[in-house]
Image: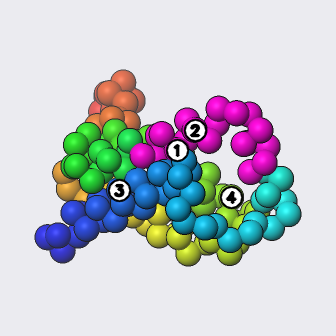
Amino acid sequence: MKYAPLVARLLLGTIFFVFGLNGFFNFISMPPLPEEAGKFMGGLAGSGYFFPFLKVCEILSGLLLLAGAFVPMALVILAPIILNIFLFHIFLAPGGMVLAIVLVLLECYLAFFASPYKEIIRNIFRCPKLESMKKG
């Protein structure tokens, strides 16, 4: 278990770095999407800015995870991205559900169970006022 946080961090970082780059260079072919999923993706692509912004966030967060730098920040940035990937596959494209579940598990493990990240994440979201109300 000593190396589990390292392996999880490197795996999550690699996935987002590679798939982020794939968004610009298309070196991994993607399977065709179901009709509703294709419409959804087409709408996002039609905005002109969403996918470049998303892919830059994925690349930078992946690099931070791979480098072991600012890992809690990378996890916070990736949390809504991973949630949307998971929900996309639940509701629109169940075929990619395995990878979505792996992403959720890696993110949750690193953010809530792996030291030292769990303590840092807990401190980011703690509410001192609420804690003082509980005590007194």
Q: On the image, numbered disc 3 is attached to which residue?
A: 13
Q: Earlier in the sequence, mark 3 or mark 4?
A: 3
Q: On the image, numbered disc 1 is attached to which residue?
A: 55
**Point 22% across, 43% down: residue:** 69
- The single residue placed furthest to the top in the displayed view is 129
Q: What's the distance in space between the residues labelled 1 and 3, CA to CA?
A: 13 Å
Range covered by the magenta-colored residues: 41-59
Q: Quadrant of residue 13?
A: bottom left
Q: On the image, numbered disc 4 is attached to which residue?
A: 88
Q: Quadrant of residue 52?
A: top right
Q: What's the distance in space between the residues labelled 4 and 2, CA to CA?
A: 18 Å
Q: Earlier in the sequence, mark 1 or mark 4?
A: 1
Q: Give the label, 3 or 4, closer to the camera.
A: 3
Q: Quadrant of residue 14?
A: bottom left
Check whether the beta carbons of the residues at disc 1 and disc 2 lie within 8 A of each other: yes
Q: Is residue 99 magenta?
A: no
Q: Is residue 49 magenta?
A: yes
Check whether the beta carbons of the residues at disc 4 and disc 2 lie within 8 A of each other: no
Q: On the image, numbered disc 2 is attached to which residue?
A: 52
